[in-house]
Image (cartoon, grey):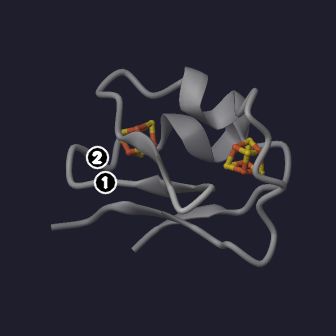
């Protein structure tokens, strides 16, 4: 199933992550001090535009 993935080379790891705010299923989680998107993701795409670094894509 498709899921959103964060490009860790571009993400600024802000604790005020704007993309996370758009996620209605709480798929953004902190893992080893990085934002990752877990299996709750329904690939809705809401977070893609909200990300200030445009570092999220659906794969
Ligand atoms: S808005 Fe994008 S770049 Fe910023 S912390 Fe969230 S995922 Fe990373
Ligand atoms: S694609 Fe939708 S469900 Fe998946 S992380 Fe982004 S906002 Fe959340």
Left or right: residue 46 compared with residue 17: left
Where the N terminus falls, by quadrant?
A: bottom left
The answer to whether mark 2 and mark 1 are in CB contact below 8 A is yes
The secondary structure type at the circle numbered 1 is loop
Question: Viewer-proximal residue, 30 or 45?
Answer: 30
Residue at point 79% right, 41% down? 14
Q: Quadrant of the C terminus?
A: bottom left
User: In the structure shown, which secondary structural element does the residue marked by tag 2 occupy?
Assistant: loop
- Which numbered marker is on residue 38? 1
Q: Residue at x 62, y 56 (%)?
A: 33
Task: Give the labeled residue for mark 2.
Answer: 41
**Where is residue 11 drawn, in percent x and y?**
77, 60
Quadrant of residue 58 within the rendered picture: bottom left
Is 5 located above or below residue 16 in the figure?
A: below
Whole-number angstrom distance, CA of label 2 to CA of label 1: 6 Å
Residue 37 picture quarter: bottom left
- Residue placed at 71% from the left, 33% from the top? 17
The residue carrying mark 2 has its beta carbon less than 8 Å from ligand 2: yes
């Amino acid at each position: 199933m498709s899921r959103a993935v964060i490009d860790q080379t571009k993400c600024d790891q802000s604790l005020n992550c704007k993309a996370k705010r758009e996620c209605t299923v709480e798929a953004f989680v902190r893992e080893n001090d990085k934002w990752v998107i877990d299996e709750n993701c329904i690939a809705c795409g809401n977070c893609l535009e909200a990300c200030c670094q445009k570092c999220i894509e659906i794969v």
